[in-house]
Amino acid sequence: MKKLDGFNLSNVHFKWSPLIKPVLFIDPSEEVEISIPDSSTNQIKENFTTDDLSKIDQSKFDGAVGPIYINGAKPGDAISITLKKIEIGDWGWSAILSNFGVLKGRFKDRLIIWKIKNGFAKTKGEFLKDVSIPTRPFLGVIGTAPPNGELPMIPPHSSGGNMDNRLLNEGSNIILPVRVDGALLSLSDPHAAQGDGEICGTAIETFAKVVIKVDLIKNANIDLPMAKVNLEDNGSHLLTMGISENPLDAMKEALLSMIKELNKRGFSSEEAYVLCSVAGSLKMSEVVDMPNYVVSLTIPEKIIEKY
């Protein structure tokens, strides 16, 4: 199995661009083990306090490990990334950053350090004392390169990126559009736990060792990320996403993408529209990575599997 070390900053980039040279080449169906630093790109340490936040270079947040070149991938294809294993670190952090989050400007900066053990996270200080958060690890950033130009790391985009979608956890199968030769896949931002929306701007941020398997889907012609996910106690679900500056437009994108996928399974557009209304679930997956929002739509595979 090939390995990629994200703690070596020569394997990390801080923008999305088709011009960034690949750091690894793999064949379709190959597995890769990737070491991924936390979203501060290893700036925040376990012994830091709130006062240390002033030392942090926020332009280095969400440094992505990659790009990984998938041999044979061409524009119009898609790649399917299976998250086979996410092994998170033994500590993590959350923060209120006064210039970030849904209520930015309302609270002062604060850094919270969590100890992670046996599937739970607990704070090390008096803040949120005696609160225990179950871990549900996932990667906040999974994306492919845009066809041209440069994009910043923080807002998600039509090829994925910083989607912060907690539904894309271990075992998920994430499908991303290919815009350039090789796809140029990058990953970052491991989370030990997060609520839908990542409301204050951070999750329980941590580092991780991840094993992925990347498959190639020729001529998929998808416009936005989608996935197959396992929801708590509810089995496998088909998931589509909308990504837009307008939450309503993001919702419509997720819905139209789901209708398109259900068309492929033999449903008419009208059938798919009603099916989404009676069996689908909409979630605001990301609300803080301005200017774009992420809306997810899921529908149980058991309802549509016979088609």
Image (tube, rainbow, N blue to C red):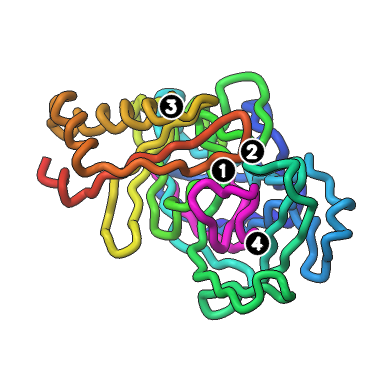
- The span from disc 1 to disc 2 (Cα, nearest Å) is 7 Å
Looking at the rendered structure, the secondary structure element under dot 2 is: loop
Which-is-in-front pick, marks 1 and 3?
3
Which of the pair 283/102 is nearer the observer?
102
Badge 3: residue crowd in 10 Å (few <14, some 14–19, many ≥20):
some
Badge 4: residue crowd in 10 Å (few <14, some 14–19, many ≥20):
many
Query: Would residue 220 be counted in the magenta stretch?
Result: no
Q: Which residue is mark 1?
A: 25
- The span from disc 4 to disc 3 (Cα, nearest Å) is 33 Å
Q: Which residues are magenta?
A: 186-215
Tell whether label 3 touches label 4 (CB within 8 Å). Answer: no
Q: Amino acid at mark 3?
A: Leu
Q: Which residue is mark 2?
A: 22
* Earlier sequence position, callout 1 versus callout 3: 1
Query: Would residue 199 be counted in the magenta stretch?
Result: yes
Residue 244 vs residue 56: left or right? left
Q: Which residue is mark 3?
A: 248
Looking at the rendered structure, the secondary structure element under dot 1 is: strand
Image location of residue 33, percent across then percent down: 55, 59
- The span from disc 3 to disc 2 (Cα, nearest Å) is 36 Å
- The span from disc 4 to disc 1 (Cα, nearest Å) is 23 Å
Q: Which residue is mark 4?
A: 207
Which-is-in-front pick, marks 4 and 1?
4
- The span from disc 2 to disc 4 (Cα, nearest Å) is 22 Å
Residue 107 higher or lower than 130, as above or below: above
Image location of residue 282, percent across then percent down: 35, 41
Q: Work out which quarter of the rendered image holds the C terminus and state it.
A: top left
* Earlier sequence position, callout 2 versus callout 4: 2
